Amino acid sequence: MIIATAGHVDHGKTSLVKALTGVDTDRLPEEKKRNLTIDLGFAYMPVADALTIGFIDVPGHERFIRNALCGLAGTDFALFIVAADDRVMPQTREHLAIIDLLGIQNCAVALTKIDRVSEDEIELATEEIEEVFAPTGLANPLIFNVSAHTGEGIQELRAHLLDQSQTLPLRAVKNNFRLAIDRRFDVSGAGLVVTGTVFSGSIVVGDSVGVAGLDMQLRVRGIHAQNAEANAGRAGQRCAINLAGTELRKEAIERGQWLTTASDTEPVSKFDAELTVLPSEPRSLSNWTPVHVHLGAAETTGRVATLGTRSIDVAETGLAQLVLDEPIGTVHGDRFIIRDQSARRTIGGGRVIDLFPPKRGRSKPERLAWLEAVREPDDKSALTSLLDLSPAGVDLDQFSINRNLTGAECEKLVAACAGKVVQHEGQRVAFAGARWLQLRKAVVERLKEWHKSNPDTTGLGDNRIMDGSGIRMSRDLAAAVAGELVKDGVLAREGFGVRLPTHTARLEGADTGLWNSVEKVFKDSGLRPITAREIEQIVGGGLKRMDAFMTRANRVGLVQRISKTRFVTPANLKELGNIAERLAANSDDQILMVAPFRDESGVGRNMTIEILEYFDKQKFTQREGEGRRIIQPADKVFASR
């Protein structure tokens, strides 16, 4: 268990931690000189069964609230300290508001310095504490009357904390390992050590890790978990990780970064979130308000873009996009705090929802509906809702990164939720079963209309199958969807396009009779490709008319255009391919040379070059020195032609 202290400056936080653990957490010379906690302090108290309670002593002065926020993030338990002679003060209230916003649900209050006041003053202080805590998620806290000076009440408080450490459930070990770096230093003989609270996952000595945003492959050389040497560290512990690696650049690692086992996580400059405005605010939070943002151990400035409304009312929760001046690492579910532009007061806080907001349309109804689905804490429920909501599918890589899922966790979710997964350009897009059937129906209807309007075309470009369907997706994804539908037998491939299996392109009207004349010219020319001009000189009708006809004949597959001007029939093209394949197979080095192909086909040298260059473009042959190597069977390459 990790306990963070909280409270106003000079209320005795450091003295109380020392009384509980025997450790003085003021480690900096300036802290000793001024008797004031400036940065985070750390202490540990052993518990039975090899467990240890970790204490993070945070600063109470308002000038060092940024350091306090760094320590409060990721803790399990808040120990509020209120001095009986000073009672509830501004930083008591602000720390309480912050801890409530961070979602820390377990706490106790130590009413300190009771040796300085009367019983009546202790009673008044107790009543005030209960009143201040009442409207928060930490209402009715246990209050312990203590004095670090006399020792009164210390044993009772220690016993309660020990009991809490035994009864509070351990955090679930899931997702990729993430540690919020709050310190880094060198240890003689060991090298670089980073410390912080582990937010998720687990790690063992020897694991490969990285720092989000830095191109460094590192190795875990050693681990101290809860101030003890260990072979492993896990969520809910404070860990010191000794890092090693040939790519290690010590100067590049600093507070606010994340040590993680996820290789594809990058800091982001904006994210969508649910945001709560504190009841203490004098007015609503308006769109584009400048703020300081604290998340994990990081801090940056930025602005709040409200989503769906012009503002978020006092004491209300709304959707917002945080647009940051400096990128920070985060994932879905991370808690954050926002403070005003001058960093003098806390405005509110919230929970990260999505790391991949669109470039435009952040407040459109469909985007807000997406956010309502993705804000669901349970991964399976969120993915199921998104799949039901998304006719164009869900990017599984983005979903996995956003939820910090391991590969195995993502695969398990996909198996449970997705009806179809399409891969394209190294990415995977999942579709709900019903959505895939809807998409398939839309594609079939689209092609029916296309074939009806264009009977002389063999098919439609595979990246255009969704045009006019009302389902918006990238051309690349549309082509990948077409490929899946071809595999499923719903579509048939035709060159670089697709068609319905029942469709055969055909010429109509006068074109049918004209083709009979043109076909005879091809038969009389042998295997030699011929031009539209040559055909027109025999058939007549004008060159412009013949050029247009040959284009239509090419579309329906009666001829193939092998160069800018020359055409060949599919049967002749296949025969030319068979000749090339046979000649290469019979050569000593399996290489097709120009001269033998010219002689065997009888088409002449210049035309031979055009044919072989066409073969290269079709990935039938590949240039190798002065010749070509066959890389696919002719029957496969030219079957559809």
Image: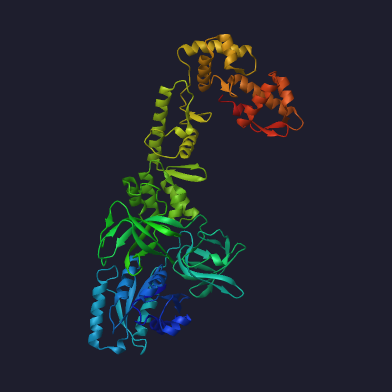
In the image, taking residue 149 as reference, residue 310 lies left or right, namely left
Identified at 61% across, 26% down, the residue is: 635
In this view, which residue lies farthest toward the front?
342
Is residue 49 visible to the viewer in this orientation of the structure?
A: yes
Whether residue 156 sits left or right of residue 503 in the image: it is left
Horizontal and vertical percent for residue 375?
35, 54
Name the quarter where the C terminus is drawn.
top right
Q: Position of residue 53 (x, y in %)?
A: 43, 75
Query: Residue at 51% across / 11% down in the picture?
Result: 514
Name the foreground residue: 343 vs 230.
343
Residue, far right: 588
The quarter holding residue 57 reads bottom left
Depth order, front residue of 399/40: 40
Identify the residue shown where x is 42% and y is 83%: 34
Q: Quadrant of the N terminus?
A: bottom left
* Location of residue 396 in the rendering, given as x and y in whole percent from the top left corner: 45, 48
Residue found at x 43% / y 56%: 269
Q: Nearer the viewer, residue 175 or 71?
A: 71
On screen, residue 514 above or below 169: above
67, 6: nearer the viewer: 67
Decide if residue 231 is on the left or right side of residue 60: right
Total marks drawn?
0
- Image coordinates of residue 325 in percent, x first then y, are 42, 59
In the rendered view, tell whether residue 502 sits above or below residue 121.
Answer: above
Please state if 170 lies on the left or on the right of 245 as rendered: left
Residue 633 can be seen, yes or no: no
